[in-house]
């Protein structure tokens, strides 16, 4: 049995997943979001030290803003894709490339420097989390950034970062992220999630929704991906 909590941190979500008595925290929101996360833990009487892993879906500033503080408070290990782990360890973040032509003209690239932090677990393609006591795995789902990953729990619940967006301001109605450094890989990553047999998507922006919604979207747009 697992239990899942969505922690709303302004326009971005963080998730807390419990399996047995241990927790995984997915993403940490923006700078200074740790206060909100700690309040959330306190309300539910969750011991910070029971958070064993902090999984970072990708290195954009609204997801890694409070890693340092959450790491100190919990003592948890941080997991990221190796490409972006190597960036944040040097204080860099991946580029945010806008997909909207007009916006792209206004903001050709958004890149932020951060206070570096170390990443203990670096994933390249896929990693089972059974050694950490969780019936879960990490898969590589690039497109939004090179090092975007998804966390899949019990082969059913996928925490997907920004690879699918259902958040009016950021994606319109198309589920397609407003930021993507490799547009063509977005649909390939959606297909990967579908092929994994996932049922529910937990995005970093907006509400939880059924994977059937993106299956329908791909059919509607007649999208065929390479295998
Ligand atoms: Zn992002
Ligand atoms: Zn984001």
Image (cartoon, rainbow, N blue to C red):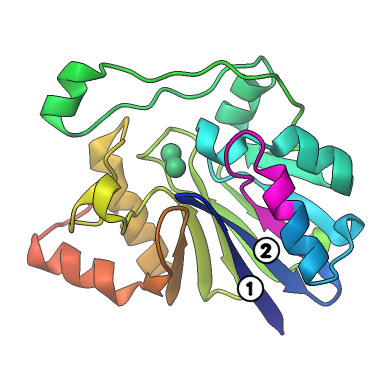
Q: Residue at x 33, y 54 (%)?
A: 165
C-beta proximity under 8 Å, tags 2 and 1: yes
Q: Nearer the viewer, residue 8 or 125?
A: 8
State whether residue 14 is above or below residue 98.
below
Numbered circle sitting on residue 16: 2
State whether residue 224 is above or below residue 35.
below
For residue 173, what is the image quadrant?
Answer: bottom left
Instruction: Please check the rendered image and state whether residue 71 is part of the magenta-colored stretch, yes or no.
Output: no
Residue placed furthest toward the bottom: 1
Q: Nearer the viewer, residue 115 or 182?
A: 115
State the extent of the magenta-drawn residues as a range. Answer: 24-37
Mark 1 burial class by Cα count in 10 Å: few <14, some 14-19, many 20+: few
Pointer 1 residue:
4
Q: Quadrant of ligand 2?
A: top left
User: From this viewpoint, is residue 198 visible?
Assistant: no
State whether residue 25 is above or below residue 114.
below
The location of residue 95, given as percent across then percent down, is: 41, 22
Q: Residue at x 86, y 38 (%)?
A: 72
Label 1 SS: strand
Q: Residue at x 50, y 50 (%)?
A: 10
Of the 4 image quadrants, the one containing the N terminus is: bottom right
N-term mark: 2 or 1: 1
The location of residue 196, given as percent across then percent down, is: 45, 68
Of the 4 image quadrants, the one containing the C terminus is: bottom left
């Amino acid at each position: 049995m697992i239990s899942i909590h969505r922690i709303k941190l302004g326009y971005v979500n963080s998730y807390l997943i419990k399996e047995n008595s241990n927790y995984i925290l997915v993403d940490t929101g923006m700078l200074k979001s740790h206060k909100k996360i700690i309040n959330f833990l306190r309300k539910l009487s969750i011991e910070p030290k029971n958070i064993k892993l902090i999984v970072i879906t990708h290195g954009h500033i609204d997801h890694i803003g409070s890693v340092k503080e959450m790491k100190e408070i919990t003592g948890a290990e941080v997991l990221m894709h190796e490409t972006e782990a190597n960036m944040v360890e040097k204080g860099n973040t991946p580029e945010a490339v806008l997909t909207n032509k007009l916006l792209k003209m206004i903001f050709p690239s958004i890149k932020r420097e951060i206070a570096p932090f170390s990443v203990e677990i670096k994933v390249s393609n896929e990693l089972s989390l059974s050694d950490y006591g969780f019936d879960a795995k990490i898969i590589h789902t690039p497109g939004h950034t090179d090092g975007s990953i998804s966390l899949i729990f019990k082969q059913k619940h996928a925490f997907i970062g920004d690879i699918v967006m259902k958040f009016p301001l950021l994606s319109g109605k198309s589920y397609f992220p407003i930021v993507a450094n490799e547009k063509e890989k977005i649909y390939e990553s959606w297909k990967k999630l579908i092929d994994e047999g996932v049922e529910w998507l937990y995005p970093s922006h907006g509400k939880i929704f059924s994977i059937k919604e993106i299956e329908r979207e791909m059919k509607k747009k007649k999208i065929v991906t390479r295998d």
